Image (tube, helix red, strand yellow):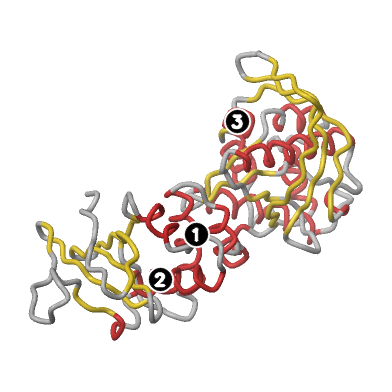
Amino acid sequence: MIKTVIDPLILALPNSSDSLEEFEEYVYRLLDVVEASEQNLKLITSKETSSLLAFELEYPEWDPVKKLLNHFGLTGMIQPKDIVGSIEKILKSNTIENLLQIEDILYENVIFSPVEISNNRKTPYLEELEKIALCILLAQEEGNNFIFVTKKLSQKTITVQGKIHEIESSDHSISKHEILTYKGDFLALSDVNRIYQDIDPITIWKNARSKEEYEYAVKIYTCQYTCTHNNSFKEWNLGNEFHINMRKYNFTHQESKINSLLRSIADAILDQNLHKVHSLRESRSGNSSQKTYKNKKALRRDIDQEFHLHYWVEGNHLEFAQLGVHNDMNIPSPSY
């Protein structure tokens, strides 16, 4: 699932001085986030989000929500329970601090680009933004990538830099070290319905460290690719040795090679370009039999003139096993 960190600011209840358009944007973003979480989003908040909203008197409780719906003439379209229920579901999500096993961090000098993400925020919301951003950078060091769901911005990538003095872990031990400067960037979106369209799968692939992250890149690429190919998806997974094998052939950082590989995998998932598919045989002889494993059959799909994608097929399920050069007829046993 796609991991998204929710900006506390977008949960704060608007007031009657805001425009109807701003209030509707607030409501429909909440509803979209909850709906997406039931499909492909893993929601993550910060541990202080709930108390921050309450402290600022912007926690969406029933009576204030009802008054705003009446004020904006939306009572017949939206019910208080829709907003209150959405907030409650979001705030039940895991926190980024819990995922990182962090109790607190001591930091300073956090700078954002574009600065609009930090402009015009009340101090408590700004401080929480700074802490969340640094936590996202710490998560990236461990191979975790998060998308930040926030207000509308002029660009999709947030660059952040800051100095961390110490980190208090969840068991209250203190990790003291020299003051370290952290700098990095992450994707920030306001419309969760555009997540698959706005993520660059090649960047995800280049930064991936685990099989799950490579599968994440494939999923995004395939969803973008299927905008022009309306075929239904086959079930699929990467084999246990796939991400190790493709590193052997340098399919990790060269964008043209990554794109060719992702396109080949997506073609297989969507049953496209079947003229590139051949049986993977026991030997190079054209008369040799197709490799099988129980009820599974082995296929090879052309990636380019040099490399081929070797995979298993059983019914509607594919397992991508490895890459092979022209005369390579090997394929690892399936993982299931």
Q: Which residue is mark 3?
A: 100
- Residue 143 x/y as whole percent: 56, 43
In the picture shown, does residue 77 fall above or below 101? below
- Camera-nearest residue between 270 and 191: 270
- Camera-nearest residue between 16 and 5: 5
Q: CA distance from mark 2 to mark 1?
A: 11 Å
Q: Are marks 3 and 1 in contact (CB under 8 Å)?
A: no
Q: Earlier in the sequence, mark 2 or mark 1?
A: 1
Q: Which mark identifies residue 266?
A: 2
- Camera-nearest residue between 292 and 119: 292
In the picture shown, does residue 75 fall above or below 103? below
Q: Earlier in the sequence, mark 3 or mark 1?
A: 3
Q: CA distance from mark 3 to mark 1?
A: 22 Å
- Residue 7 x/y as whole percent: 72, 44
Within 10 angstroms of label 3, few (less than 14), some, or many (20 or more) residues?
A: some
The picture quadrant where one finds residue 91 is top right
Q: Which mark identifies residue 96?
A: none
Q: CA distance from mark 3 to mark 2?
A: 33 Å
Q: Which residue is mark 1?
A: 217
